[in-house]
Amino acid sequence: MVKWLKDNRPEIIRGQMMERHIKHGGTDMNPVQDFVRYNLLTNFLTSPDFISCNIADRRTVSLLFCRLLYRVQMMDWTVDSMDDYELVKTDESIVIFEDIEP
């Protein structure tokens, strides 16, 4: 879908979600798909404008590489405690909050 938007509607802002889906209980993806998505291996095809990442999985070489090489904006999700906010507030990312006001 993100590739289709890039090719057919490039004016629409595109994002890519990143997490270790299987680690967090997901069952709708096989391990190869999970690996490809988690390591952002399709981003050279899709050129997302932002990467939305589970805060538990935000420290990866692939995410750092994409941020430096493609200058992509990062979003941290979902921050639902002040402890989580303390972890992510220096990431220079957009933060998605749930049930708290920082």
Image: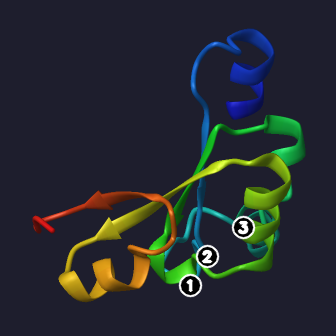
Q: Is residue 42 visible?
A: no
Q: Which residue is mark 1?
A: 23
Which one is in front, 13 or 89? 89
Residue type indicated by callout 3: Leu
Give coordinates of residue 35: x percent, y percent. 78, 72
Secondary structure under the numbered disc 2 in the rendered image: loop
- Quadrant (top left/top right/bottom left/bottom right) for the C terminus: bottom left
- Quadrant (top left/top right/bottom left/bottom right) for the N terminus: top right
Give coordinates of residue 78: x percent, y percent. 33, 67
Q: Quadrant of residue 76?
A: bottom left
Q: Which residue is mark 2?
A: 20
Residue occupying the point 57% across, 26% down: 13
Q: Are marks 1 and 2 in contact (CB under 8 Å)?
A: yes
Residue occupying the point 26% across, 89% down: 83
Q: Residue lying at the far bottom in this picture: please name it.
A: 83
Q: Is residue 20 above or below residue 15?
A: below
Give coordinates of residue 100: x percent, y percent. 11, 68
Earlier sequence position, callout 2 versus callout 3: 2
Residue occupying the point 46% across, 75% down: 90
Alpha-carbon span between mark 1 and mark 2: 5 Å
Q: Which residue is mark 3?
A: 63
